[in-house]
Image (spheres, helix red, strand yellow):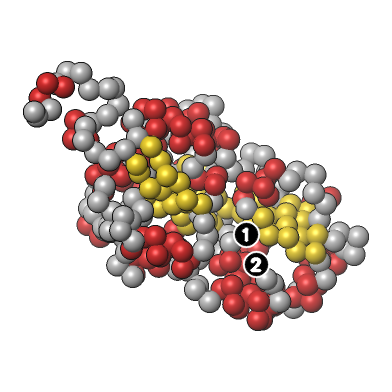
């Protein structure tokens, strides 16, 4: 028997194309903040699917899962990880579509005809450092009473920081501090920590030290593995994820700003909107183009930092 008998009786939120689709969708995320449990459950209920979510930052493990059979179906990861994977021909490439049209032009190639989409920017932030007494970062380094430096646990950003600090002659001072690397959600929650913390510049942290080469512009988003057999379903899920109703409800629970051009609800602080990137000084800001696969080794061998 065909499925014609279901006409007019499909559950709300599910496409007819996927009546017989597999219920399991494999999603790999590098940071738990990118796909909170509350969003997972809402999408599962709305789309009548079940997510199998893997959280890992192990590059070799990610590559293995992307080319495995069955493959992962959606990746949520930093932009420079996706750029590197695309160079390895591991990602699904498509032209302009309904999902990309939601994204503010500032986050896409300015020439529309050149937009080969393999990465969908969803979130962004500019980082800075919060120090006790709102001192400069250099003053923090020289303050012997301030003992701890909290850094974002991203090996590429860490390597950039240490190389810059070495060039500035600050490395010896940095290495006198107790260095703790934490996931982004833990950095944000660690409000009472003494020392200096790397944080997103937003309405909660308006007075960060954002000296050019201390700050980074970071972008996270979605990619679809070329080996996935659920590419159309992945686009449907990402379209649902970027619905204003979901983003308005959940964005402020995360440390991220949005790239979505229609997300302009008055409840969302201007700093969290896509247009705010035009208000920021970005010259000299750390921009990471591709993943440095040697970053963990360089951090260990050159700077004695073991992740």
194 or 5: nearer the viewer: 5
Q: Quadrant of the C terminus?
A: bottom right
Q: Which residue is mark 1?
A: 153
Crowd rating for badge 2 (residues with CA inside 10 Å; few <14, some 14–19, many 20+): few
Q: Quadrant of the N terminus?
A: top left
Q: Which mark is residue 307?
A: 2
Q: Secondary structure at mark 2?
A: loop
User: Where is residue 14 shown, x and y percent of the image?
Assistant: 27, 29
Q: Is residue 21 positioned above or below 184 on the image?
A: above
Tell me if label 1 and label 2 are in contact, CB under 8 Å.
yes
Q: Position of residue 8 (x, y in %)?
A: 17, 18
**Residue 224 at x, y = what percent?**
33, 53
Q: Relative to 3, does residue 94 appear above or below in the rendering? A: below
Residue closest to the eye, 201 or 37: 37
- Eye-nearest disc, 1 or 2: 2
Residue at position x 50%, y 72% in the image = 292
Picture coordinates of residue 180, whole percent (x, y): 73, 60
């Amino acid at each position: 028997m065909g499925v014609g008998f279901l006409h007019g009786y499909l559950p709300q939120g599910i496409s007819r194309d996927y009546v017989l689709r597999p219920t399991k969708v494999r999603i790999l995320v590098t940071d738990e903040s990118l796909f909170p449990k509350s969003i997972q459950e809402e999408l599962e209920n709305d789309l009548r699917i079940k997510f199998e979510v893997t959280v890992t930052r192990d590059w070799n493990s990610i590559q293995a899962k992307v080319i495995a059979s069955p493959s992962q179906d959606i990746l949520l990861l930093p932009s420079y990880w996706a750029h590197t994977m695309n160079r390895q021909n591991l990602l699904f490439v498509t032209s302009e579509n309904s999902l990309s049209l939601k994204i503010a032009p500032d986050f896409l190639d300015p020439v529309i005809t050149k937009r080969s989409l393999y990465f969908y920017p969803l979130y962004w932030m500019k980082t800075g450092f919060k120090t006790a007494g709102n001192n400069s970062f250099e003053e923090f380094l020289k303050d012997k009473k301030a003992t701890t430096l909290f850094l974002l646990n991203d090996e590429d950003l860490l390597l950039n920081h240490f190389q810059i600090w070495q060039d500035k002659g600050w490395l010896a001072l940095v290495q006198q501090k107790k260095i703790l690397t934490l996931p982004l959600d833990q950095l944000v929650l660690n409000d009472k920590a003494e020392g200096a913390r790397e944080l997103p510049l937003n309405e909660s942290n308006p007075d960060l030290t954002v000296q050019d080469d201390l700050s980074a512009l970071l972008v996270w988003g979605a990619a679809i593995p070329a080996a996935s057999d659920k590419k159309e379903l992945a686009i449907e899920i990402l379209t649902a994820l970027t619905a204003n109703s979901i983003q308005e409800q959940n964005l402020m629970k995360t440390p991220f700003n949005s790239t979505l051009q229609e997300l302009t609800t008055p409840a969302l602080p201007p700093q969290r909107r896509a247009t705010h990137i035009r208000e920021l000084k970005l010259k000299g800001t750390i921009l990471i183009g591709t993943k440095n696969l040697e970053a963990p080794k360089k951090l260990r061998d050159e700077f004695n930092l073991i992740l």
